Image: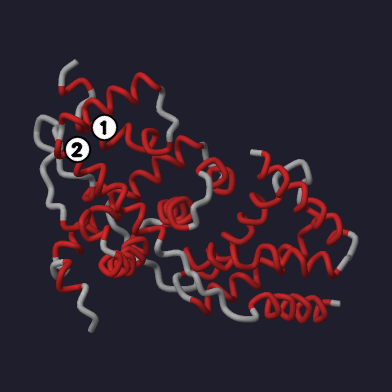
């Protein structure tokens, strides 16, 4: 097996999503891992790809407006009462 | 997934109660989903006030259109679609966002297709909580630059942490198409984060409280 067996381009542009979500078949996964072990730029790339995911997970708005559920109920009641 | 099926069965029970005019059933539905719908709306609109109004619109549509929901389908897919449409409808009233070309943000590759070495400031920075939070604020802006279809994909999967198969169902696209959008969106955000990290002060300085 050579370094180019899974080229960097294919790894980055085509294979990474399936590798990361665990849906990649075993043989291809092993080839990709072999490539990563022997290709420092791709390994750095993978780390930055994962760091992107970690960063994005910090974005979720943790503060839901207080009384939002009551506001929703009030809004729906008012709008439906108007129609009736 | 068994948990998913249990959730859907429980949703359907509430749907039937709402169809029968049970107000308490509607209240329970609001309690169950308002935070998720708000979060989804916030992803599209990036503004608390707009997200709150879109959440109200989504539940109004749910209340009025519940009779059109086909009970052989998953409730959350139907309702997330309703919520997304409510958010899109509000987004359309605002000025159109500047479109970026995602092709400009694919990773740098050498002529022979090999990966080029890249600086690691971002990777190191993302390990540091303070820098990572700063970068997350940047990421919010970068997501806004994405075309809507890509923004939805990355927001739902990476921020909301929904399962890709569920997101594909909500967006009514194939799983392969969702994965492709997701990957392109991630490559874009990653590249923009790399650029942002390059102008961050070193980690040691960031740890000193302002």
At 42% across and 40% down in the image, what residue appears?
B179
Tag of residue B162: none
Residue B199's place in the image compared with A57, above or below, is below
Mark 1 Cα shell of 10 Å, populated few (<14), some (14-19), many (≥20): some
Q: Residue furthest bottom?
A: B210
Q: How is the image coloured?
A: secondary structure
Where residue B18 sits, quadrant-wise, is bottom right
Is B70 on the left-hand or right-hand side of A46? right
Give left or right: position of B64 versus B169: right
Report helix, strand or loop for mark 1.
helix
> Label 2 vs label 1: CA separation?
8 Å
Q: x, y percentage for residue A44?
A: 19, 44
Numbered badge on residue A42: 2
Q: Which residue is mark 1?
A: A11
* Mark 2 or mark 1, whichever is nearer to me: 2
Name the residue rendered at 64%, 58% in the picture: B82
Residue at 16% x, 57% y is B121
| Cβ–Cβ under 8 Å for marks 2 and 1 | yes
Residue A28, placed above or below residue B64:
above
Q: Where is residue B201 shown, x and y percent of the image?
A: 14, 70
Return the residue found at the far right: B20
């Amino acid at each position: 097996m050579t370094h180019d067996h899974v080229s960097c381009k294919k790894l980055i542009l085509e294979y990474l999503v399936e590798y990361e979500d665990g849906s990649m078949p075993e043989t291809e996964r092993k080839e990709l891992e072999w490539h990563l072990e022997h290709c420092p730029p791709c390994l750095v790339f993978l780390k930055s790809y994962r760091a992107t995911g970690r960063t994005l997970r910090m974005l979720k708005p943790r503060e839901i407006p207080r009384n939002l559920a009551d506001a929703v109920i009030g809004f729906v009641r008012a709008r439906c009462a108007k129609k009736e | 997934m068994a948990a998913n099926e249990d959730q859907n069965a429980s949703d359907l029970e509430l749907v039937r109660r709402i169809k029968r005019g049970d107000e308490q059933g509607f209240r329970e539905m609001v309690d169950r989903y308002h935070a998720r719908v708000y979060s989804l709306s916030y992803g599209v609109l990036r503004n608390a006030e707009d997200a709150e109004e879109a959440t109200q619109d989504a539940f109004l549509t749910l209340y009025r259109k519940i009779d059109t929901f086909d009970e052989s389908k998953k409730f959350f897919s139907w309702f997330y679609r309703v919520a997304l449409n409510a958010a899109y409808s509000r987004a359309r009233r605002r000025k159109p966002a500047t479109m970026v070309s995602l092709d400009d943000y694919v990773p740098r590759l050498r002529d022979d297709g090999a990966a080029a070495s890249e600086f690691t400031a971002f990777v190191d920075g993302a390990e540091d909580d303070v820098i990572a939070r700063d970068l997350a604020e940047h990421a919010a802006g970068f997501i806004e630059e994405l075309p809507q279809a890509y923004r939805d994909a990355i927001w739902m999967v990476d921020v909301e942490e929904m399962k890709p198969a569920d997101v594909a169902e909500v967006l009514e696209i194939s799983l392969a198409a969702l994965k492709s959008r997701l990957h392109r969106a991630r490559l874009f955000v990653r590249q923009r984060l790399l650029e942002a990290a390059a102008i961050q002060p070193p980690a040691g300085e960031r740890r000193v409280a302002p």
